[in-house]
Amino acid sequence: MAGQPEKWTLDGFLSHFIEIENNMRDRSFAFLLGAGASKPSGIPTGAELVEVWLNELHERHEPDRKARPLEKWATADALEIPKFEYSRRATFYPQVFERRFRDDRDAGYAYLEQIMEGAEPSFGYSVLAQILVKTRHSIVITTNFDDLVADALSMFAHKHPLVCGHESLTGFIRPQMRRPLVAKIHRDLLLEPKNDSAGVSELGEGWKEALRKLLEHYVIIAIGYGGNDGSLMGLLEQIEPKGLAGKILWCYREGSGPDQRVLELLTAKKGIMIPIAGFDELMLLLNEKLGFPLQADEIEKQAKVRATVYRGSFEEIQERVKPKPGAAEAKKEESEAVAKLVEGQSGWWGWELKATSESDPEKREQIYRAGLKEFKDSCELMCNFANFLVSVRKKHDEAEELYRRALELAPDSALVMLNLANLLNYVCKKHDEAEEFYRRALGLQPSDARVMGRLMGNLANLLTNVRKKHDEAEQLYRRALGLGPDEAHIMTNFARFLARVRNNHDEAEELYTRALKLAPYDADIMGSFANFLTMFRKNYDEAEKLYRRALELAPESAVNTANFTSFNLARGKILEAKEMAGRAWPLCAKDRGQAAAEVALYRGIISRIEQRDDTPALGRLKTMLVKGFQRQEWSFDDLLAMATDKLSADDNRLYAALAAAILDVDKVAALEEFPRWKTVEPIALDVPWPDGQ
């Protein structure tokens, strides 16, 4: 299209990179990194920080936040930011920073230090470090304050770069460097970084000349850079095309193109647009093209915690690129790259990667058992196998034995304690022992922020669901999300808590939406969000879409099949509800939890609507209520309202009382007031249902 920059495919870019690497020794690349490259490492983007700071300002300055929610309050006048628009809030990052930390700039720097403290380079940075050391493409220009590039060079390539974190150091920059260069044009985090309007709008003295010299010799590959600052973008706009070593290669996240200013820059400089899935994914493909091996064994020799972070980052990519039901085949290249790397990996982690690559549960179990025969004392492989036995094979007794053996091998492993506590909490219902393990593990202060966050999140679940200690639970949820802002399941649990305990539906919906973006193929998150939309928003069309998608992804989900049965029955879709109830019962009856009681209730109501005998349903429900189960929050209001005109007055009263008893153990005794209930004989849950039921 005329007036638009040229666009290449990702494959075309990769081929171009290798062609330059192999055939044009006089041309080198420089990587221009923005905040998007740091996000996989757990550092919030500028847009995310703007959201946090606006919420804090709203809390400080608006006494009636319910009457004036953030989107109405955050105006140019209220914030004292000229031309501020809430819809474009991310582009006002420096102005919002100035407003939030007005008259206390040190507090702002301390805030930035805190969110970057302990951030570990993601898998993508491990590849970048090898490129910087093993090839001539040894320059990084960045607007970021963090130390991820320098840390990655030290951890993964054992090389220390020249970090130019202040304009006073630009005299040391030369086109030909003996070691990798990290040019931090907005300064280092610890050197009063430029984060305000004036600082990011103009390059510091020395940078213009230094960068001009570099760009005469290095072709820019921009990754994760939005071009929102005036300093670097201003320089790029001023430089004539002949002042650049080659065309600017601008990588942007597929699905959201560069903004207008970037498009105009690329058009003027004959630049190239390249859509990518993300920083890690791009580096994964470059890794495969350049033939770099996985480094887990060597990293483990250096530091166990670093190896754990590296493995976790790669396994997340491995999971992300797996084919998903109903999804377009958009990650074939990444999948093939992962498969090649997995094939060449040895050691206990090699067995782990081979197991997680196998989709057949039987074969996957065989791989784990073979791996444990070779690595009998690998607590990591033992713990991962136990996780598989819990989540897939439902062999809970063997899993518990494996967790306890792993804990004997590594008595100070917070991760093993976390997994064992989760089994005790969610499956075995041994809440006292589970809480003891959660708190013991937290006391170890694990250095892995994700493990720490998951410990807090799961303890919060126990405290709110079992102990009813909601205040402590909320504190833990918020701390957990601070440590792991991309933890979709913690986000989902907190959203459920906010909706059902705090009645904070707006924040809950925001968290659900974020969680689903982070984990778009997670059936549990979809089902939970559908429940929320049904109960609190009455958005039945969107809820139904989510239920159906969730059951496509996980057709054996007991909870989602039970909840979709309730949804259809409440909407008056009797035939579909009956079909779903038939699917749901064998799944729910295995666990003998509240979901089984709910499905028995639904089948009883369906029977009465169809003018059939409901004794088979009531008998099973009586067994459940007599033996007991752990209660959870739920609502039968829509269901009972639907039944009002379809059941007799006596049936309406009985089923309303049964619904109350399912949710509250203290209401079970009141059922004895119903003569028909007193005549019902308990029926074992494994007894086949009569035909037609």
Image: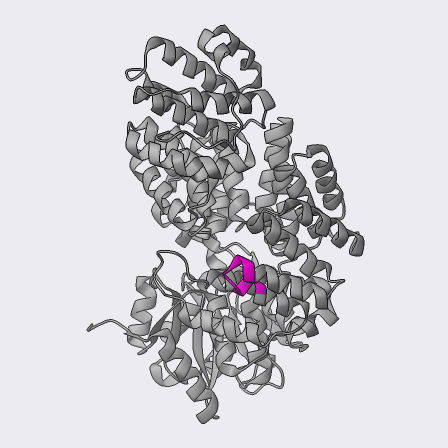
Task: Say if the magenta span includes residue 534.
Answer: no
Q: Position of residue 447 (x, y in %)?
A: 70, 55
**Which sits in the foreground, 639 or 55?**
639
Image quarter where the C terminus lies is top left
Dividing the picture into quadrants, the one containing residue 583 is top left
For this view, does 240 lie left or right of residue 48?
Answer: left
Residue 201, horizontal then vertical, whole percent: 44, 62
Examine the rendering and report whether any part of residue 199 can be seen: yes
Numbered range of the magenta stretch:
355-363
Frontmost residue, 451 versus 353: 353
Q: Decide if residue 73 is in sight here.
A: no
For the N terminus, give its image quadrant.
bottom left
For image coordinates 45% across by 49% down, the residue present is 522
Q: Does residue 426 appear to the left or right of 633 in the view shown? A: right
Return the x and y of residue 123 as percentages of the image width and height.
Answer: 56, 67
Q: Is residue 692 above or below residue 192?
A: above
